[in-house]
């Protein structure tokens, strides 16, 4: 039996970061979680882990050693053109929501993933 777990992160603005990640992941605010110095989002289907953010006074200063990969193309096998279209559409959506595109990685001649930063500078990938 798997253990239930929450991915926790530090933030200077927990509500803003939670709103960004809720959009990125298709999550919703956690019912009953009402803390001015924190925020929590959950998978509305109840399958994925919760993601919570706690206000801290310091800003991010170094590279993440752990990050989220958003897999918009689902599981293989993929049609390379459809996969690239899904990745690029999600990247554009997240840029509009406050993310920054850093670089695009290819696997041979196919789009592999796009490295991005969330609104507080945390690295993540869209694949």
Image: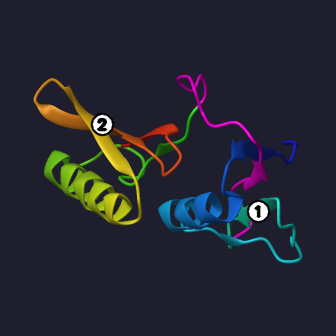
Q: In this view, does 48 lie above or below 27?
A: above
Q: Name the residue under label 1.
A: 39
Q: Does the magenta stretch include residue 68?
A: no
Q: Dot 1, how many residues are within 10 Å of its Cα: few (below 14), some (14-19), or many (20+)?
A: many
Q: Decide if residue 34 is in sight here.
A: yes
Residue at point 66%, 57% (across, down) = 13
Q: Dot 2, how many residues are within 10 Å of its Cα: few (below 14), some (14-19), or many (20+)?
A: few
Residue at point 26%, 61% (across, down) = 89
Residue at point 62%, 68% (across, down) = 27
Viewport quadrant of the C terminus: top left
Residue nearest the viewer, comparing 56 with 32: 56
The part of the chain drawn in magenta is 45-66
Residue at point 49%, 61% (across, down) = 24
Q: Is residue 61 magenta?
A: yes
Gap between marks 2 and 1, in whole Å?
26 Å
Q: Quadrant of residue 48?
A: bottom right
């Amino acid at each position: 039996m798997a253990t239930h777990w929450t991915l926790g992160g530090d933030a200077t603005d927990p509500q803003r970061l939670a709103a960004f990640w809720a959009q990125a992941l298709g999550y919703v605010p956690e019912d009953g979680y009402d803390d001015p110095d924190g925020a929590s989002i959950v998978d509305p289907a109840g399958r994925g882990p919760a993601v919570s953010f706690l206000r801290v006074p310091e800003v991010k200063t170094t590279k993440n050693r752990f990050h989220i990969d958003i897999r918009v193309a689902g599981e293989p096998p993929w049609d390379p053109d459809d996969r690239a279209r899904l990745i690029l559409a999600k990247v554009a959506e997240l840029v509009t929501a406050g993310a920054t595109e850093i670089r695009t990685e290819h696997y041979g001649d196919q789009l592999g993933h796009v490295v991005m930063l969330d609104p507080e500078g945390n690295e993540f990938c869209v694949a």
